[in-house]
């Protein structure tokens, strides 16, 4: 387990935000399902993106990974070349690829590690039972599955994970007949579904959205090969936006003002809390601000919860984060993790069943905190260090490799002082 020591210091300067992990997954999969050669540019090969790329290779797609791009020789007639697909710790990879793998009609075993082995797959089990698809699991991974999806009406609960919906959206257009996805209850994380539909459209696949209650999907569609450049990631820029509010002025490059990413909600959230943020056509400028508490509904942006909690712990007054129960089944229980680690350094955070209640302070103590094997916990705690009164040590800092392996390099470029300590 790696550890870093961060000496409290304001960050300031200019940083290029890494490409969207959500869009990278989607573009790689769409290109893989398109007959012909495509390239996906502006890629960071984090553990999650490597997992998706390797998964599509297991289904017979040829991938040529370069420094910051990937050339893909796609094929919609998938052929299983590796019966075991290791999703590492990527929930997106697992839930996106399961339905795609069923296009081969072969038995496939999905493996993983860490929390991924226990993250829920009940939505797919229900579909398998209805569609006569055989599967073998002891509640989680490894999962063996064999069978074929057929054109049908698929019912999916809206408050579990949009990843199941996206997985079906990749696959159903290739079936020999029309299908639909009916949403049971209110759909959360609508932004992620919007992203999926938009990327599919760019690759020539059309999906009709009936008010997020039903999605109509014509069969016999074809993905069209094309080149795609991934835009900057709003779930990652959120960390530097908070850093700018807490410390010095920061300019964040490669951010689209008109992005469809659901985590673009960070802009409205920090403005609600009194933060000064300018969103220009291709960059975001953040200014030091005196922020205050607010009530934040996280139902559409669950990945923002850790960094919002950090900002709230250092904002005047009380913040309530609500409708965030789903973050308990992410890489960690992120409500418990943020309550635990922020309180270790002097914050005042209480858990509720679906959120957090945070009474802010101007400064926090230093000390030793744990990263919970969760990239977003590590990065959120790193930003808390800006307003600590003494050094902050983060154990398990290697978790950033999941989504943002160059995070601490960028942290240093903005003036941060990070020392790597001997591993324990």
Image (cartoon, rainbow, N blue to C red):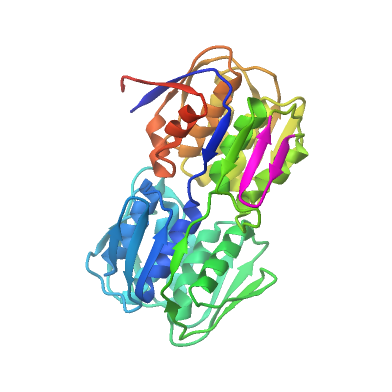
Q: In the rendered view, tell whether residue 400 sits above or below residue 88.
A: above
- Residue at image position (75%, 35%) is 273
Q: Please state the horizontal and vertical placement of residue 203, each as a whole percent of the image.
A: 48, 73
**Residue at the farthest left position:** 81
Majority secondary structure of magenta residues: strand
- Residue at image position (48%, 57%) is 230
**Residue at the farthest top position:** 390
Q: Number of marks in the image?
A: 0
285 drawn magenta: yes
Q: In the rendered view, tell whether residue 193 sits above or below residue 42.
A: below
Front residue of this view, candidates 34 and 217: 34
Front residue of this view, candidates 421 and 411: 411
Q: Quadrant of the N terminus?
A: top left
In the picture provided, is 222 more to the left or to the right than 202? left
Q: Quadrant of residue 346?
A: top right
Q: Quadrant of the C terminus?
A: top left
Q: Please state the horizontal and vertical placement of residue 195, each as a whole percent of the image.
A: 57, 62
Q: In the rendered view, tell whether residue 368 sits above or below residue 36.
A: above
Instruction: Tell me, yes or no, if residue 363 can be seen here.
Output: yes
Q: Please state the horizontal and vertical placement of residue 80, each as a whole percent of the image.
A: 25, 71
Q: Quadrant of residue 334?
A: top right
Front residue of this view, candidates 302 and 134: 302
**Magenta-tinted stretch:** 275-287
Q: Please state the horizontal and vertical placement of residue 384, each as a whole percent of the image.
A: 57, 25
In the picture provided, is 178 more to the left or to the right than 211? left
Instruction: Tell me, yes or no, if residue 297 can be seen here.
Output: no
């Amino acid at each position: 387990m790696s550890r870093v020591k961060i000496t409290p210091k304001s960050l300031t300067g200019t940083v290029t935000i890494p490409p969207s992990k959500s869009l990278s997954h989607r573009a790689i999969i769409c290109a893989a399902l398109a007959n012909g050669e495509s390239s996906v540019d502006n890629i960071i090969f984090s553990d999650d993106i490597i997992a998706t790329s390797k998964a599509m290779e297991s289904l017979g797609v040829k991938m040529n990974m370069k420094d910051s791009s990937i050339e893909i020789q796609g094929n919609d007639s998938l052929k299983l070349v590796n019966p075991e697909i290791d999703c590492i710790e990527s929930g997106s990879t697992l839930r996106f690829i399961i339905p795609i793998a069923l296009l081969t009609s072969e038995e496939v075993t999905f493996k993983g590690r860490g929390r991924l082995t226990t993250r829920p797959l009940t939505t797919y089990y229900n579909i398998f039972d209805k569609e006569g698809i055989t599967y073998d699991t002891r509640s989680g991974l490894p999962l063996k599955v064999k069978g074929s999806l057929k054109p049908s009406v698929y019912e999916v609960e809206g408050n579990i994970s949009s990843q199941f919906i996206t997985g079906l959206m990749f696959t159903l257009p290739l079936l020999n007949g029309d299908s639909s996805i009916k949403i049971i209850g209110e759909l959360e994380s609508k932004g992620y579904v919007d992203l999926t539909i938009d990327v599919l459209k760019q690759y020539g696949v059309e999906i009709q959205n009936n008010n997020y209650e039903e999605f109509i999907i014509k069969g016999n569609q074809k993905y069209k090969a094309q080149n795609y450049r991934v835009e900057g990631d709003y779930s990652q820029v959120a960390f530097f936006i908070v850093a700018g509010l807490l410390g010095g002025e920061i300019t964040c490059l490669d951010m689209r003002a008109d992005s469809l990413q659901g985590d673009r909600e960070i802009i409205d959230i920090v403005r609600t809390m009194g933060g000064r943020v300018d969103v220009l056509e291709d960059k975001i400028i953040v200014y030091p601000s005196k922020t205050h508490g607010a009530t934040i509904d996280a139902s559409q942006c669950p990945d923002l919860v850790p960094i919002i909690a950090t900002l709230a712990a250092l904002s005047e007054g009380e913040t309530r984060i609500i409708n965030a129960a789903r973050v308990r089944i992410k890489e960690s229980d992120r409500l418990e993790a943020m309550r635990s680690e922020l309180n270790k350094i002097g914050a005042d955070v209480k858990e509720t069943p679906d959120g957090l209640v945070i009474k802010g302070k101007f400064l926090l103590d230093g000390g030793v905190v744990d990263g919970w094997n969760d990239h977003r916990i590590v990065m959120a705690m790193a930003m808390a260090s800006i307003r600590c009164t003494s050094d902050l040590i983060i154990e398990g800092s290697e978790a950033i490799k999941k989504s943002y392996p160059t995070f601490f390099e960028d942290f240093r470029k903005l003036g941060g002082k990070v020392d790597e300590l001997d591993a324990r």
